[in-house]
Image (spheres, rainbow, N blue to C red):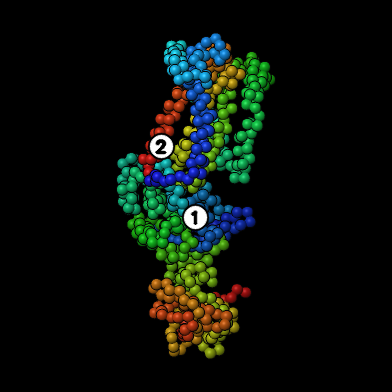
Amino acid sequence: MMRQRRLSLGQRLTLAIPYLWIAAFFLAPMLLIAKISLSHAVLARPPYEPRFLSSDTLADIWAKAQSFTFDNYRALVADSLYFDSYVSSLAIAGVSTVATLLVAYPFALAMARGPRQWRPFLIGLAAAPFWTSFLIRVYAWIALLKDEGLINNALMALGLIDAPLQMFATTGAVVVGIVYSYLPFMLLPIYAALEGQDPSLREAAADLGASPLQVFLRVTLPLSRDGVVAGALLVFIPAVGEFVIPDLLGGSDTLMIGRTLWNDFFANHDWPAASAAAIALVVILLAPLLLWERARLREEEGRR
Amino acid sequence: MSAPLLSIEGVTKKYGAIVALDGVKLDVGAGEFFALLGPSGCGKTTLMRSIAGFETPDSGAVRLRGEDLAGVPPHRRPVNMMFQSYALFPHLDVFENVAFGLRRKGEKEGAIRARVSELLEMTQLAPFGARRINELSGGQRQRVALARALAPKPALLLLDEPLGALDRKLREETQFQLKEIQRKTRTSFVIVTHDQDEALALADRVAVMRGGRVEQIASPIDIYERPATRFVAGFVGETNFVEGVIARDDGLAFATTFGRLPRAQCALPEGARATLSIRPERIEVAREGQGIAGRVEDYVFRGEYTLLRVRVAPDVVLRVGAYDGRFAIGDDVKLTIAPEAGVLFAAAA
């Protein structure tokens, strides 16, 4: 079915642009980090060895390459801090993703079912937070969550609580921050999936005896699966490596790999260890994603 | 006729200033094949959606076996609908599409399997149970939609332009299948269509609708032979409209610009302005002899007959069906219109 055909030069160039982009801005830095992860730390600037110079001969390069080591990866496994950070990051990102989904789905549904002429406005509202700085919005949450913050003051004024609740500087605050910050990334793909659904499918289901709840569970939800998966990935992946939100809203005991990395990089000046941790994170996130995508493609091919 | 299965009693529905249904009254009997025929915007789809429960009439009642359906949501109505777009579930295979209604009824797995197999057999889809919807041809999808709507054994099946998306050849084949399935299942079918051929071919009775009103309800033959209004005559089948005046001085006749046409019967008074609707195939054509003189202006070969355009007066061209037709442009012909052929309508005051 896939017909082999010759592409014109223009088509090739068009296709080449995204690949070149990825090569220049994703692959090249990744290779650099991979290389640093195989180096060892020294007290210098930059703080790792070996370094390759443009004056190196082939023999020099070979000699320097001999000093590459997997010690940093061994350290990752040996030091439980890394393991704990990964597990904690995945857990926090997982909980946050589920929470974001639960908040975003009803929003997306309301947007998709709302009057057609309102939809551009609603999409604009969903994207409105992007008009202010991410950092300022996270800081704003401090003002809401801290002991003498808006929420505690309001609850105390209403007499619902006597002492302020400890909300700021907790892992829960991190989850709230992630849900808030990443909501649009979940909302928009789900909205797109729901908006594209043929309303006559829901009518057909109702006509065949499905109650409104069954229509949702049997038709609307399964047909929005691709949007949910896309949204979940767009939230989960950056949330695992999130640094700003746990740093500003999390407590001293909130362990996330982004913070551990930052400490290695800037506090300990151990670039090779931080690089190894970063590469490991990419592998942890990318491997299941690639497997899932391959399974999906195979399923789609099987259907043809 | 016994008590009707479905009765529509003075149903009216307005969308703002637009009147979609205007006091529609009709009955559908048990086991009847009924057609709602009309041009787009005549209200036939709104009427069907009111029966299914997707629209709520402003006034009037929709009764099924005498029971008022007002306030009964679509999923509790023993009425199923075959959607014009088919609305098949793309995430389910053919079997599960057909089983959908049965599962909602909470039937046992064994009963579901048996019923779905029976329907797949009936619609010649037996080998395709495990297929996805996007792997099916248009005709197969149409049959899945029919099987799915029939599966829960509805009291009444609504079909929205069921053959609209099929090509011409498949359409004819499917017409026979639809009729056969309707006979076998003894379910009342209400079909909505803008295609007069489809309505005439399939239905026991046809309701012709226009502007939210029912113009005529009758058998296909009566609709065709005895249209109640000028609109019905023009909408169903091909026809000629001839303007003239009723004359009774020398035997009942219809006086036109190209001559007097004797009439067998007419309730209109002497001198009344009227329009005669005469089908092309009811005008006899000969090369010589008695009759209205005319000249062939143009012709279209249609296979079983040739449609001629014959000028009989400077301002009148009649379409005439010729069965032995080797006519050429410019031929002189004689036309005869039998006194009982055609229908007279009084000109609108």
* Residue type pointed to by label 1: Met
Q: Callout 1: residue from which chain?
A: B
Q: Which label belongs to residue A50?
A: none
Q: Nearer the viewer, residue B303 or A268?
A: A268
Lateral position of residue B76 relative to residue A245, left or right: left
Asked if badges 1 and 2 are on one and the same chain, I answer no
- Locate residue B101: give its quadrant: top left
What element does badge 1 sit on? helix
Q: Position of residue B234 (x, y in %)?
A: 52, 70
Q: Position of residue A187 (x, y in %)?
A: 55, 34
Label 1 and label 2: CA atoms lie apart by 41 Å
Q: Callout 2: residue from which chain?
A: A
Residue at position x 51%, y 12% in the image: A41
Q: Nearer the viewer, residue B276 or B334?
A: B334
Q: Which label belongs to residue A297?
A: 2
Q: Which label belongs to residue B48?
A: 1
Lateral position of residue B214 relative to residue A163, left or right: left
Q: Quadrant of the C terminus of chain A?
A: top left
* Residue type pointed to by label 2: Leu
Residue at position x 43%, y 67% in the image: B220
Residue at position x 66%, y 21% in the image: A143
Number of marks drawn: 2
Crowding at dot 1, Cα within 10 Å, few <14 / some 14-19 / many 20+, comes out as many
